[in-house]
Image (tube, rainbow, N blue to C red):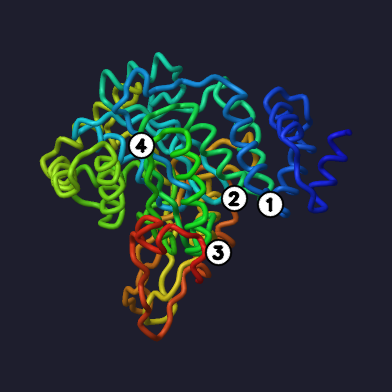
Amino acid sequence: MSFSETIARKRDGGRLSRAEVAHFVSGAGTGDLPPEQLAAMLMAIFLVGMDKEESLALTEEMLHSGEMWNLRDEVPEAVDKHSTGGVGDTVSLVFAPLMAAVGVPAAMMAGRGLGHSQGTLDKLEAIPGFQVNWDRRGMLALLQSCGAAVVAQTDDIAPADRTLYSLRDITATVPSLPLIVGSIMSKKLALGAGTLILDVKCGSGAFRKTLPEALELAEALRSVARSAGVACEALITEMDQPLGPALGTACEVRQAVEIFEGRGSAPLREVSVRLAEEALVLRGRPRLEARAALEKALDDGSAGAAWEAFVRAHGGDPDPALLAEPRRILEIGAEISGVVAAMDGEALGRAAVEVGAGRRRMDEALDHGAGIEIAVRLGDRVEKGQALARVLVGEREIDRAAVVRKVSEALVVGDLPIEVPPLVYGTPEDLFGGTATAES
């Protein structure tokens, strides 16, 4: 059967055999299947879905398509962390040095911007000199020197995912559950850390918009990890608004630095600490002791020192004055007085992509001086004319009026007080006893 026939059968509701999944993955990794056929299959999977057997086959075929680092053989105490993607999600930049500061190595294979979200690697590369391309030996050296390593996926780790990841970004197929699980877990299991903490986003700025959808993803990811012998927990966190105020690359690095300086975004700090706390609990520390150690590291400057060591070990210069600046700032004010009633996080993320903080094409360069800054949070009382957001304009040519309109429309000011969602919903057991059947 030709691959076009396989695509058509999946498009029409059929299921893929293990051999057909293997053909799809192998073709993506080797280049034997052209991008247009890969994109067509991604869309068919997005529209039709995959059952559990297909999803497991996809993850396993992607995992075994390349080399596996089995990091826990060398550094059994190392912790990995993954976010399912949102906006203003600067947690990884805080998490890795924070873990190092309390004596637990953090090892992460991170990604670039995907869809409307900005990627950890893109943010780190906004730091002058920062290198993300390291092999296994290089990662081990980083862990030895500074206790934290954040690296890019190599050509030999889940090679199919490198191609499919980029295609998902430009074909609007990012939110597909089996594609998310296959992409994330093939890389996480290939890295092979013994402990994994998952930050599963839920809300308008997430790929999974509703709590049941986020819960389904949390359980799917956690189940795969635990089945592979990885100590894993998932926290579902709120993404109905940007976590931190900055959406971009250099501007998000500045947000991380502010956390290490004892100021900055309180929600960003809290989610970072909570995820680090869960990681320490998975490593066997009592919860209260773990929380106290993390807060102390942030307050006494040791986490900040770990950040500087982390940046230098990766070849970067930690001086925030060297980060790219916007050429112009466009301020967006409230048209009426009232309460911030809603934010369209995805629209804000896409506006950040448009100004230069993300890629509209696979080969497009980023503009590290560009981004969006949100000046308010849900439930805030604002007066007419008060700043709601700022558009950071860099070097990329943009339609300024269109971007300002998009950001303005994404921020809704109303008359009545609203119920603000919790910052952290909790684990699947905290919510619904570990089942994905709860109603919205």
Q: Which of 427 and 343 is in front in this view?
A: 427
Mark 3: which secondary structure? helix
Mark 1: which secondary structure? loop
Mark 2–mark 4 contact, CB under 8 Å? no
Q: Which of 203 and 285 is in front in this view?
A: 285
Q: Nearer the viewer, residue 16 or 26?
A: 16
Q: What residue type is labelled 1?
A: Gly
Mark 1–mark 2 contact, CB under 8 Å? yes
Specify which label sits upstream in the sequence, 4 or 3. 4
Give the label on residue 49, or none.
1
Residue at the image point whose x is 44% and y is 59% from the top: 330
Q: Give the vertical position of 310 relative to 261 (above or below).
A: above
Tell me the distance, in whole angstroms, between the alpha carbons under discs 4 and 3. 26 Å
- Horizontal and vertical percent position of residue 28: 70, 30
- Which residue is denoted by mark 3 in the rendering? 406
Specify which label sits upstream in the sequence, 4 or 1. 1
Specify which label sits upstream in the sequence, 2 or 4. 2
Judged by depth in the image, the label closer to the viewer, 4 or 1, is 1
Residue 306 position by quadrant = top left
- Which residue is denoted by mark 4 in the rendering? 323
Judged by depth in the image, the label closer to the viewer, 2 or 3, is 2
The residue lying furthest to the bottom in this view is 415
Residue 378 position by quadrant = bottom left
- Which residue is denoted by mark 2 in the rendering? 177
Mark 4–mark 3 contact, CB under 8 Å? no
